[in-house]
Image: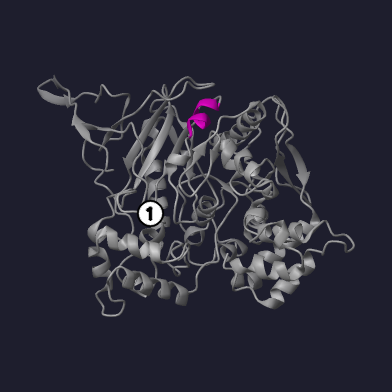
Amino acid sequence: MGRSSTFLVVAALTCAGSTVQAALTSSLGPVVDVGYAAFAGNSTSPTGIANGPVTFFGSIPYAQPPLGNLRFRAPQPLNEHATASSVSDSRNWGPPCIQRPAVVGIGSEDCLTLNVWKPTNATEGSKLPVAVYIHGGGFYYGTPQGFPMYDWVAQHPGGIISVSITYRMGILGFLGGPEVEKDGDLNAGLLDQRAGLEWIQRHIAAFGGDPDKITISGESAGGASVMMQVVAYGGSKPVPFKRAIAQSIGYGPTMSPSQVETNFNNAAIYAGCSPSDGTTMDCLRKASIGAIVSAANRNPNGAFAPIVDGVNGIMPDLPSRLITARKFSPVDFLGGHCTGDGNTFAGGNPTQFITEDDIRTRVFSRWPGVTNDTITQALSLYPAPGTPNSPFATEYERATAIAGDIVFTCMDIYFADKSLQKNVQNVFAYAWNAPDPVLYNANPYLGAMHTSDLYFLFDGATFGNAGNTFTPFNDTEEALSTEAIAYWTSFAGSGDPSAARKATSPLWAPFADGTTRSHLVLARGGAVNTDSAMQNITDAQIQRCQFWMSDAVTSQTGV
């Protein structure tokens, strides 16, 4: 699937002896002209709840195709100095990027596109806030097609623009090592995201958006991407956004330089290139897409992901260390996690956690750099079932708390606290306690497992390796979905999730009130009122997060 086709629709007017180009139009749908290019959108999308119809524009290129000599390089800018003389058919999605498992013919290397949803009646000058979504998928799979944002646009009472970005993943987005550093660019996938955000900042006004009111959001690897964009360049460069929403921040362990080089060498060999004769990058750029697919599939999941790329790189250190050093951009922040994130990543089901040794073996298999001494220290912070003051009824509950806290639970709490220390005014936290019912019915022990929030934020989406599926809401699911979208878009609009909340929803209080830390726990209830409520974060939880986010521990976990 390639880029959108174009067709000529130029009208000219003669005025005082000169030719003036009239506004471009198309029979396909509404046209937005950004100067160098124009796009025809699709207005057959669902009727809005608050703002009438929504128009969708898909497959909008934000950088040159990363092909040939541009493979494994930072995204290169388009020629934005020309004047549009034709309109691109932008009524459909662009192709997903190649991912893992990879199949030739599914996905494309030419995938650097974004998608825009806007109220149909929004025009340049509307200056609506903008919400940008960065999809997750472990940095090796996923596509914006699984995250439709019609409801976000339709529901917000004052109007909002939504955007989603496609970015290179896996081997094409995150191949690392000295050879890439010498003849290419590290963390190309993160650079893609940044290029997409900069395109949005330059051109979103033409769609009715306000370039000074951009909020980025994402879940799991998308949440990690949000954090990496916030700490990018150690906070030394201006960011093309004002606010950030990080959901279930998920990444790590970040690979060491020796692991990165091993994965590079393996990729080169699998692609049919020598890793040591000085021509490796040239060979990899000339390799067929079939050879690249083979190399991607023969390396394990996670072999190619964001890495620390040096003092001048987009990720000059581990995000946790940059946060600790307050080397990040001060932006309004809303962050949280699913209460069952740890259930998803504990490494087993309840029957497989009988003793403390099961926790050592199963939970920490995901974190091989963590020493036995650190594991012992960690276990002391999570009292064993049956001991005084233990909140855990079983070893499984203890295991899932640890698995969740290592990054998913603690990164958002820790960053919220550090944001306050950097005088950020709008800081909010949450815990999502409503399971994805499809996943829950299959495995009830997982509770409000990882990705549960996506079900409610994106039309009943259940996130899967083969793509998302969508399930119609019942009344209580609908109530929580509209409540959550109202909070999310309200934050994007004003920095306050309560400003445009539903009349039946509780006030979402700031993260800090003096020495007390609190978050909103979102939960299903009735068809009108949910069971969402504010809850204090315990001192024990704060202590555990301080442990996991300490330099001594993050140097082992790589977060």
**Quadrant of residue 262 in the image?**
bottom left
Task: Give percent across and percent down for residue 442.
Answer: 63, 44
Task: Give percent across and percent down for residue 142.
Answer: 45, 49
Give the side of residue 374 with respect to residue 116, left or right: right
> Measured along the vertical axis of the image, is residue 226 above or below residue 157?
below
Chief SS of the magenta region: helix
User: Residue farthest to the left?
Assistant: 17
Residue 426 visible in the picture: no
Q: Which residues are magenta?
A: 149-156
Q: Work out whether residue 232 or residue 489 is closer to the camera in this orientation and state it.
A: 489
Residue in the picture at 60% in, 51% down: 248
Residue in the picture at 70% in, 57% down: 400
Residue in the picture at 65% in, 70% down: 553
Find out whether residue 11 is within the magenta segment: no
Q: Which residue is mark 1?
A: 168
Residue 536 visible in the picture: yes
> Measured along the vertical axis of the image, is residue 546 above or below residue 462?
below
Task: Give percent across and percent down for residue 381.
Answer: 78, 65
Q: Which amino acid lies under the numbered mark 1 shown in the image of this protein?
A: Arg
Q: Work out whether residue 442 or residue 289 is closer to the camera in this orientation and state it.
A: 442
User: Residue farthest to the bottom?
Assistant: 277
User: Residue farthest to the right?
Assistant: 388
